Image (cartoon, grey):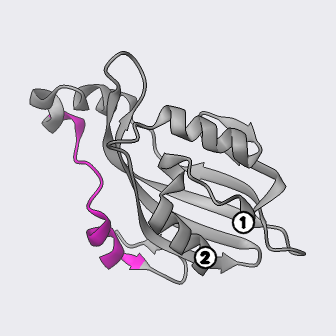
Amino acid sequence: ADAINDGLRTNEWFVTGRGLPQYFSDAFTFSDPDVSLDGIEPYCRQVRRLFDQETSRCEVVCCSATAPNTITVVWRNSGKVNIGPLGVELKPYVVTTTLKTDPTDGLIMSQVDDFVSDGPGLLLYQLPLLRPLAGPPAPSAEALRERCNFATCALAA
Protein backbone atom coordinates (compact mmCIF):
# COMPACT_ATOMS: atom_id res chain seq x y z
CA ALA A 1 0.00 0.00 0.00
CA ASP A 2 2.89 2.38 0.70
CA ALA A 3 4.27 2.10 -2.84
CA ILE A 4 0.80 2.68 -4.32
CA ASN A 5 0.26 5.66 -2.01
CA ASP A 6 3.62 7.18 -2.98
CA GLY A 7 3.01 6.56 -6.69
CA LEU A 8 -0.47 8.08 -6.60
CA ARG A 9 0.66 11.16 -4.71
CA THR A 10 3.48 11.68 -7.22
CA ASN A 11 1.83 10.65 -10.51
CA GLU A 12 -1.91 11.02 -9.73
CA TRP A 13 -2.43 8.25 -12.32
CA PHE A 14 -6.17 7.99 -11.62
CA VAL A 15 -6.48 11.26 -13.61
CA THR A 16 -3.17 11.54 -15.52
CA GLY A 17 -2.85 8.00 -16.85
CA ARG A 18 0.81 8.00 -15.77
CA GLY A 19 0.46 4.56 -14.19
CA LEU A 20 3.25 2.46 -12.78
CA PRO A 21 3.01 -0.77 -14.81
CA GLN A 22 5.41 -2.63 -12.52
CA TYR A 23 2.63 -2.79 -9.90
CA PHE A 24 -0.03 -4.23 -12.24
CA SER A 25 -0.81 -7.76 -13.36
CA ASP A 26 -1.07 -8.55 -17.07
CA ALA A 27 -4.65 -9.61 -16.24
CA PHE A 28 -5.55 -6.17 -14.78
CA THR A 29 -9.18 -5.05 -15.13
CA PHE A 30 -10.82 -1.71 -14.37
CA SER A 31 -14.45 -0.82 -13.77
CA ASP A 32 -16.49 2.10 -12.51
CA PRO A 33 -20.22 2.90 -12.81
CA ASP A 34 -19.72 3.92 -16.47
CA VAL A 35 -16.76 2.00 -17.96
CA SER A 36 -14.98 -1.37 -17.97
CA LEU A 37 -11.50 -1.90 -19.43
CA ASP A 38 -8.95 -4.72 -19.59
CA GLY A 39 -5.22 -4.02 -19.29
CA ILE A 40 -3.17 -1.28 -17.66
CA GLU A 41 -2.12 0.31 -20.98
CA PRO A 42 -5.70 0.75 -22.30
CA TYR A 43 -6.71 2.07 -18.86
CA CYS A 44 -3.89 4.65 -18.85
CA ARG A 45 -4.65 5.75 -22.43
CA GLN A 46 -8.35 6.20 -21.64
CA VAL A 47 -7.64 8.16 -18.45
CA ARG A 48 -5.24 10.49 -20.34
CA ARG A 49 -7.90 11.09 -22.99
CA LEU A 50 -10.77 11.67 -20.57
CA PHE A 51 -9.20 13.99 -18.01
CA ASP A 52 -7.91 17.46 -18.86
CA GLN A 53 -4.23 17.20 -18.01
CA GLU A 54 -3.91 20.87 -17.06
CA THR A 55 -6.66 20.96 -14.42
CA SER A 56 -7.50 17.45 -13.20
CA ARG A 57 -6.41 16.40 -9.73
CA CYS A 58 -6.39 13.14 -7.80
CA GLU A 59 -5.90 14.20 -4.18
CA VAL A 60 -5.32 11.11 -2.05
CA VAL A 61 -7.15 11.18 1.27
CA CYS A 62 -6.32 7.62 2.37
CA CYS A 63 -4.47 4.64 0.93
CA SER A 64 -4.42 1.55 3.16
CA ALA A 65 -4.35 -2.23 3.08
CA THR A 66 -7.86 -2.76 4.44
CA ALA A 67 -8.22 -6.54 4.03
CA PRO A 68 -6.15 -9.43 2.66
CA ASN A 69 -5.19 -8.67 -0.96
CA THR A 70 -7.13 -5.39 -0.82
CA ILE A 71 -5.92 -1.80 -0.95
CA THR A 72 -8.51 0.93 -0.52
CA VAL A 73 -7.87 4.42 -1.81
CA VAL A 74 -10.17 7.33 -1.01
CA TRP A 75 -9.48 10.37 -3.16
CA ARG A 76 -10.94 13.70 -4.20
CA ASN A 77 -11.47 14.15 -7.94
CA SER A 78 -11.57 17.64 -9.42
CA GLY A 79 -10.77 19.52 -12.62
CA LYS A 80 -12.15 19.09 -16.11
CA VAL A 81 -12.96 16.20 -18.39
CA ASN A 82 -12.58 16.34 -22.16
CA ILE A 83 -16.23 16.12 -23.16
CA GLY A 84 -17.59 18.55 -25.75
CA PRO A 85 -15.71 21.41 -27.35
CA LEU A 86 -14.90 23.25 -24.10
CA GLY A 87 -14.71 20.33 -21.70
CA VAL A 88 -16.80 19.87 -18.58
CA GLU A 89 -15.69 21.15 -15.20
CA LEU A 90 -16.28 18.58 -12.50
CA LYS A 91 -17.96 19.46 -9.25
CA PRO A 92 -15.30 17.99 -6.92
CA TYR A 93 -16.36 14.60 -5.57
CA VAL A 94 -15.00 11.70 -3.53
CA VAL A 95 -14.05 8.38 -5.15
CA THR A 96 -13.42 5.13 -3.30
CA THR A 97 -11.11 2.87 -5.28
CA THR A 98 -10.70 -0.79 -4.36
CA LEU A 99 -7.55 -2.44 -5.66
CA LYS A 100 -7.42 -6.25 -5.47
CA THR A 101 -3.98 -7.82 -5.50
CA ASP A 102 -2.82 -11.27 -6.53
CA PRO A 103 -2.03 -13.28 -3.38
CA THR A 104 1.00 -14.90 -5.02
CA ASP A 105 2.89 -11.92 -6.48
CA GLY A 106 1.12 -8.90 -4.94
CA LEU A 107 0.41 -7.28 -8.32
CA ILE A 108 -2.83 -5.34 -8.80
CA MET A 109 -5.38 -7.54 -10.57
CA SER A 110 -8.37 -5.20 -10.51
CA GLN A 111 -9.45 -1.66 -9.81
CA VAL A 112 -13.06 -0.78 -9.02
CA ASP A 113 -13.97 2.90 -8.61
CA ASP A 114 -17.12 3.76 -6.69
CA PHE A 115 -18.64 7.23 -6.55
CA VAL A 116 -22.00 8.94 -6.53
CA SER A 117 -22.79 10.49 -9.89
CA ASP A 118 -24.84 13.69 -9.75
CA GLY A 119 -25.90 14.45 -13.33
CA PRO A 120 -28.15 17.44 -12.57
CA GLY A 121 -25.56 18.89 -10.17
CA LEU A 122 -22.86 18.48 -12.81
CA LEU A 123 -24.94 20.39 -15.35
CA LEU A 124 -25.71 23.21 -12.90
CA TYR A 125 -22.03 23.39 -11.95
CA GLN A 126 -21.14 24.40 -15.53
CA LEU A 127 -22.73 27.82 -15.04
CA PRO A 128 -21.05 29.79 -12.25
CA LEU A 129 -24.26 31.66 -11.38
CA LEU A 130 -26.09 28.35 -10.89
CA ARG A 131 -23.36 26.59 -8.87
CA PRO A 132 -25.09 27.27 -5.53
CA LEU A 133 -28.00 25.15 -6.81
CA ALA A 134 -25.62 22.27 -7.61
CA GLY A 135 -24.97 21.57 -3.94
CA PRO A 136 -21.61 21.83 -2.26
CA PRO A 137 -18.50 20.29 -3.79
CA ALA A 138 -16.64 17.65 -1.81
CA PRO A 139 -14.67 19.15 1.08
CA SER A 140 -10.95 19.73 0.57
CA ALA A 141 -8.67 16.69 0.79
CA GLU A 142 -7.26 18.11 4.03
CA ALA A 143 -10.75 18.38 5.58
CA LEU A 144 -11.54 14.83 4.43
CA ARG A 145 -8.32 13.53 6.03
CA GLU A 146 -9.46 14.99 9.36
CA ARG A 147 -12.58 12.76 9.15
CA CYS A 148 -10.77 9.64 7.96
CA ASN A 149 -10.12 6.39 9.80
CA PHE A 150 -6.81 5.49 8.15
CA ALA A 151 -7.07 1.79 9.05
CA THR A 152 -10.29 1.40 7.05
CA CYS A 153 -10.30 4.54 4.86
CA ALA A 154 -13.86 5.18 6.13
CA LEU A 155 -14.92 8.82 6.37
CA ALA A 156 -16.86 9.91 9.44
CA ALA A 157 -20.00 11.94 8.75
Q: Amino acid at mark 2?
A: Ala
Q: Quadrant of residue 75?
A: bottom left
Q: Residue 8 placed where, x, y %? A: 51, 64
Residue at the bottom extreme of this rendering: 151
Q: Is residue 17 above or below residue 87?
A: below
- In the picture, the quarter occupied by the C terminus is bottom left
* Tags 2 and 1 touching, CB below 8 Å: yes
**Depth order, front residue of 33/50:** 50
Q: Residue 112 placed where, x, y %? A: 65, 52
What residue does disc 2 label?
A: 3
Q: Quadrant of residue 52?
A: top left
Q: Which residues, given as a range, are shown in magenta?
A: 133-148
Q: Residue 103 placed where, x, y %? A: 86, 74
What residue does disc 1 label?
A: 23
| Image-based side of 50 in relation to 155, left or right | right
**Depth order, front residue of 99/86:** 86
Q: Secondary structure at mark 2?
A: helix
